[in-house]
Image (cartoon, grey):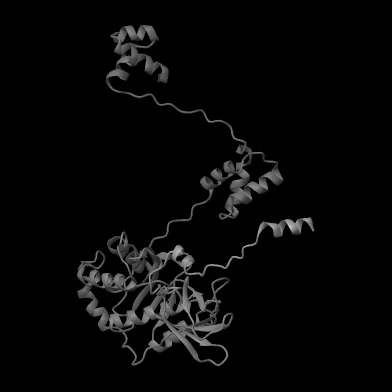
Amino acid sequence: MISEEDLMDIRALSRQGYTYAEIGRLLGRDWRTVKRYLEDGAQPVYSRKRMPSKLDALKPVIDQWLAAQPGLLATRVHQDLVRDYGFEGSYNTVRRYVERSRPKPPARSEARFETRPGFQAQVDWSHEQPIRTSSGLELPLYCFHMVLGHSRDSFCRLTGSQDLVTFWACHRAAFTHFGGVPHELLYDRTKTVVRQHVGRDVTIEERIFHPEALASAHHYGFSMRLCQAYRAKTKGKVEHDVSWVRERLFRGHSFTSYEDANIAWLSWNEEIARQRVHGTHGEIVAVRAERDHAALLPLPPTSYVVVDRTTRVVARDGFFSFEGRRYHVPDAKPGERVELVLGATELEVHSLLDGRRIARHERGRPARVLPDPVEDSVSLAQVLSAFPDPEVHHRPLSRYEEAIDG
């Protein structure tokens, strides 16, 4: 094998017109070697000499620790090496070795599973690009997704909030859209479904699920199932729907209101999404959805409406703030605390003194803090000219000289 410098010299001498034999004599190489590197395009293989590391003597210790505790953090390994073994190297040296040497868990095989018609629907939220209104105001845009597991028929509702009231209002809209209720709904551990997030799971449902989630499940007859923690693939059907709808409809959208966004989705869903041949089950989604819808639980005669309550303090101008918007309360005193009863699309204001309703607003509509002027504005010169001329008293200068002389 020749060095990189020799290869450069061979190529330079060849360009100058030297023969293979002449190049070989000049560089002390056989002419066949010169020919092989010039005609066959052979490339020398270079290997960098490995430099000793400060960590070499301690690598068996790290291997022993990782064999006993595979999840041991590199920060902990570096800390103990410095404290107990006098290690003087950097943390990054330890981190790189730990990443290479940590035992890798065996790859788990994943079996694709399908659900029978009407049995399960998967639920999720997505956060989309904000809406820009005609006046230039940016409003947050969230999308509620519910996907029937058998057919992949989906329902989406574009909203400006992900709170408890909106979440269950989207459920009611989805059940109406599908014409029935799935036997089981699959959720991740969202706060609107699960009340306990930290610590081990308990078996008593009342200690896990949100009371409104339990009440909704009892009213509509569905059962609730939670995804395994850190296993988003458990609800892969709705996860795929989130990305699929985003790339084909939501990205780069031009919605100017929530109503415009929902109308656009409804039209797109009927014309494109439900007419496609799904890549998994190989059927047209709308055709397969007929079996899915027919197996759903019937809708109850009445809906279960979830509301929420909170309080706000009325400012001196007669407005209070909620969700970044200002609402007017004409009959409240400045500094008075009022109760808000929140629905999906409306907001009622109640007095805490006697419980009466004192105002009602459409939720999410930005309210004007000050009304537009009825008449045209006038200039400052017109305002000053409207004042009467002040009366000026004239005194002779002799009066001031007498006052000075005393």
Identify which residue, 247 or 81, lies in the foreground.
247
Q: Position of residue 110 (x, y in %)?
A: 38, 63
In the picture, the quarter occupied by the C terminus is bottom right
Q: In the picture provided, is 230 more to the left or to the right than 51?
A: left
The foreground one among 335 and 279 is 335
Closest to the observer, 250 or 8: 250
Q: Is residue 232 visible?
A: yes
Does residue 381 appear to the left or right of 391 in the view shown?
left
Residue 111 makes an appearance in the image: no
Quadrant in the picture for the N terminus: top left
Q: Residue at x 30, y 18 (%)?
A: 38
On the image, which quarter does residue 399 sit in?
A: bottom right
Relative height, residue 56 to residue 263 (above, below):
above
Drawn side of residue 3 relative to residue 316, left or right:
left
Give x and y (percent) for residue 245.
30, 65
In this rendering, the count of numbered labels is 0
Q: Up-down: is 95 above or below 319?
A: above
Question: Where's residue 155, x and y in %?
Answer: 31, 74
Image coords of residue 285 (percent x, y): 23, 71
Closer to the camera, 50 or 174? 174
